[in-house]
Image (cartoon, rainbow, N blue to C red):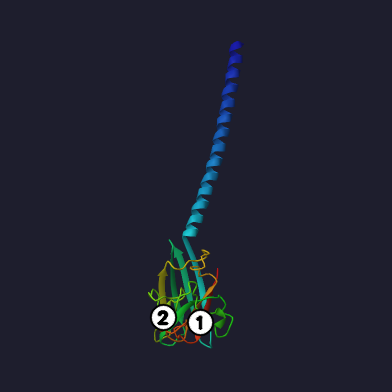
Amino acid sequence: MKTLKLFVLTFAVVFATACKDNKKEEEEEEVNTEVEETVTQAEEMVEAVKEKKLSITLSPKSDSKVEGTINFTEKDGMVTMVGTVTGLEEGEHAIHIHEKADCSAADGTSSGGHWNPTGQPHGEWGAETGYHKGDIGNLTANANGRATITKTTDEWCIGCGDETKDILGKAIIVHLDVDDFTTQPTGNAGARVGCAGIIE
């Protein structure tokens, strides 16, 4: 009888210990799963911060037929702009970032002047004498009126909040004429024939 009681007692202890161990393992698995999910979410957020993308569409202004798409990508502190514009006259045309993402005016003037947060004179990008953060330069249209442009810089950012770098809330303007990089404050670039607001 004593042996039977001892056996039952031993079995109960083993069973209780096994249940505790199983419960502990299940709790550890749940915690591990939650940690893994949190880590995955954090990694996804980091990746999202590492690379930002933005695409805007040019609309015609000043009775032009200009259209196009401008794509911005920010990665590792560098912003790359890749643009395709159609409906242009053959030859060179100025392209700038203007201070307001407002393309409501028929002539594009609602976008304000060149984006110039550092108060520099107008000029060619990188010039020692100064240049606007919006002085992208010129693009060249072929006989079919199509032009492309690519620019990469660390002087812009997408949504970083730095007023001297942040392109959000600004506009891309394509002009009828070439930018001479000399005439103040516009480069004598002529009418605004395409406009796109840079907004999220």
Q: Label 2 amino acid?
A: Asn
Residue 101: x and y in percent read 55, 75
Residue 95: x and y in percent read 45, 79
Q: Nearer the viewer, residue 45 or 32?
A: 45
As drawn, is 102 to the left or to the right of 95?
A: right
Q: Label 1 amino acid?
A: Gly
Q: Residue at x 53, y 44 (%)?
A: 35
Please state, as top left, top right, bottom left or bottom right, where the N terminus lies in the image.
top right
Which secondary structure lies at badge 1?
strand
Q: Residues within 10 Å of mark 1 (few under 14, many from 20)?
A: many
Up/down of 171 relative to 16, above or below:
below
Residue furthest to the top in view is 1
Q: Nearer the viewer, residue 188 or 43?
A: 188
Q: Nearer the viewer, residue 23 or 141?
A: 141
Residue 100: x and y in percent read 55, 75
Q: Residue at x 59, y 80 (%)?
A: 104
| Earlier residue among tags 1 and 2 | 2
Q: Which residue is mark 2?
A: 138
Q: Quadrant of residue 137?
A: bottom left
Q: Which residue is mark 1?
A: 194
Q: Residue at x 61, y 15 (%)?
A: 5
Distance, label 1 to label 2, CA atoms, is 14 Å
Residue 40: x and y in percent read 50, 50
Up/down of 8 relative to 89, above or below:
above
